[in-house]
Amino acid sequence: MRIAVDDLSGSEVAAFLAEHVAEMRSITPPESKHALDLEGLRRPGVTFWTVTDDDGSIVGCGALKALAAGHAEVKSMRTASARKRSGVASLLLGHLIGEARRMGYARLSLETGAAEFFAPARALYAKFGFEPCAPFADYKPDPLSVFLTRAL
């Protein structure tokens, strides 16, 4: 597998992200959906990576969004359905943490869902040292959201 910064210009990454946003919308009501769409991921302060398989197909993605000096948010973590529980997410999250350190961030935070569907994601984040925290940035308290953070 290969992890690389993606400029979000390809049709494959657009389709991968559209599937992600559609799935999040099917699970989470609009007022609790925080997944960034393609345009949101193209904003300044967001760096986006794709994970590709040996054949070049996208099997995962994730982003870092600058929040404040020394603080970034993990966004748009996704693994292709056919590759779930195959190590893609662990490889990518480890990469994002390393890149955040390299970029000079001292803290990473994220929002994920509270529903059972998101239990594997919450377990992954806990494995990497993320702990519950209060809502951060522009987030508001939401019973459908779990907020996590970790120092780097």
Image: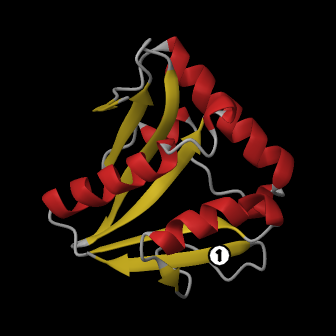
**Count the marks: how many?**
1
Q: Which residue lies furthest to the front in this view?
A: 86
Task: Tell me if mark 1 has few (under 14), some (14-19) or many (20+) residues whose alpha carbon lies within 10 angstroms of its own.
Answer: many
Q: In this view, does 1 lie to the left or right of 78?
A: left
**In this view, 77 is above or below 103:** above
Q: Where is residue 124 drawn, in percent x and y?
A: 54, 63
Question: Can residue 103 be seen by looking at this rendering?
Answer: no
**In this view, 46 is above or below 145:** above
**Residue at 45% in and 45% down:** 62
Q: Quadrant of the N terminus?
A: top left
Q: Is residue 143 left or right of residue 51?
A: right
- Tag 1, which secondary structure? strand
**Residue at 62% in and 46% down:** 85
The part of the image, by quadrant, that contains residue 86 is top right
- Provide the residue designation for mark 1: 146
Q: Where is residue 52 drawn, in percent x and y?
A: 42, 25
Q: Which of 47 and 82 is in front in this view?
A: 82
Q: Where is residue 12 drawn, in percent x and y?
A: 53, 16
Q: According to the image, what is the colour scheme of the structure? A: secondary structure
Q: Is residue 127 left or right of residue 106?
A: right
**Residue at 77% in and 62% down:** 31
Amino acid under disc 1: Val
Q: Where is residue 128 drawn, in percent x and y?
A: 42, 69
The part of the image, by quadrant, that contains residue 42 is top left
Question: Can residue 60 be seen by looking at this rendering?
Answer: yes
**Residue at 57% in and 43% down:** 78
Q: Quadrant of the C terminus?
A: bottom left
